Image (cartoon, rainbow, N blue to C red):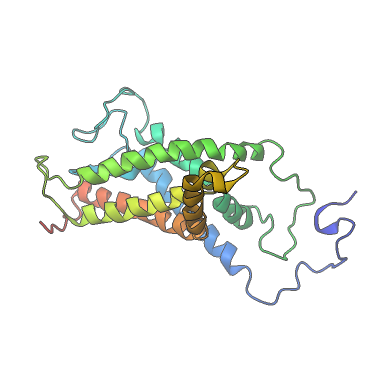
Amino acid sequence: MSTGVTGPGRAAIEARTLRTDRWWISPLVTFVVFSAFVVYATWRAFAGAYYYASPYLSPFYSPCLGDCVEGASDFGQPFAGFPLSAALIILIFPLGFRMTCYYYRKAYYRAFWLSPPACAVAEPHAKYSGETRFPLILQNIHRYFWYAAIVVALILSYDTVLAFRNEEREWGHMGLGTVLMLVNIVFIWLYTLSCHSCRHAVGGRLRHFSKHPVRYQLWTWVSKMNAHHARYAWISLFSVAFVDLYVYLLAKGTITDLRFF
């Protein structure tokens, strides 16, 4: 039996779409931006260098648990001797969180798999099984990656606090890198806490909100943030990459940090 747009009960329209607007712009922009980020992040993750410029640690390498440069490791180096870049030890968690994110699924399903490329536009695939089969059934572990993302966000918050120290580890420093890390961690938390899984964690499985006023208030706050989840997803993606680039340029000596005090 035919399925999808050719299934019984669907309008017999042979045209790919009747839309007259430029519907293809959104998936095209998503494809270009995501591809650029993947290329950049892959290069930086495997580089294994220029990720620490005291007191700034790149978020791609935090926490640094492998063979790290001096000053970059605040939690020890339990994976010392790891043959590849130290970033590869921990990137699986923030990457897994973003790749299984409900918004990112919609974005890359449309941009890369054309499933479907846009609303009211027929997809080129003859069959569709959703996320019920391997490998897409693994998307259901998103909630567990959210727990890991909370831990990562806490560690990045700790790194941001340390960014108020100077090279001698004395408090009272603030540079452009400190500001960038502050902006980044704010959007990291907004993206993490506006997640659908967070909304379920604080207010899910409740039969009566009236009996749980605290959780109801938390659910209300998360629900309001959830309406902007896509925006936070994009901004935090850019902020993470920008902070890493800034640290890279500092560590390489290409630029110097702008100091405020």
Side of 16 where 47 appears, left or right: left
Side of 149 where 205 appears, left or right: right
Q: Is residue 48 above or below residue 80?
A: below
Name the residue: 47% across, 49% down: 218
Residue 213 spot, x, y in % from top left = 49, 47
Side of 241 where 204 appears, left or right: right
Residue 257 spot, x, y in % from top left = 17, 55
Residue 148 spot, x, y in % from top left = 44, 36
**Residue 232 visible:** yes
- Image quarter where the C terminus lies is bottom left
Q: Residue furthest bottom?
A: 20
Name the residue: 76% across, 73% down: 18
Number of marks: 0
Residue 180 spot, x, y in % from top left = 27, 55
Q: Residue 6 occupies which quadrant of the picture?
A: bottom right
Name the residue: 52% across, 35% down: 144
Nearer to me, 6 or 37: 6
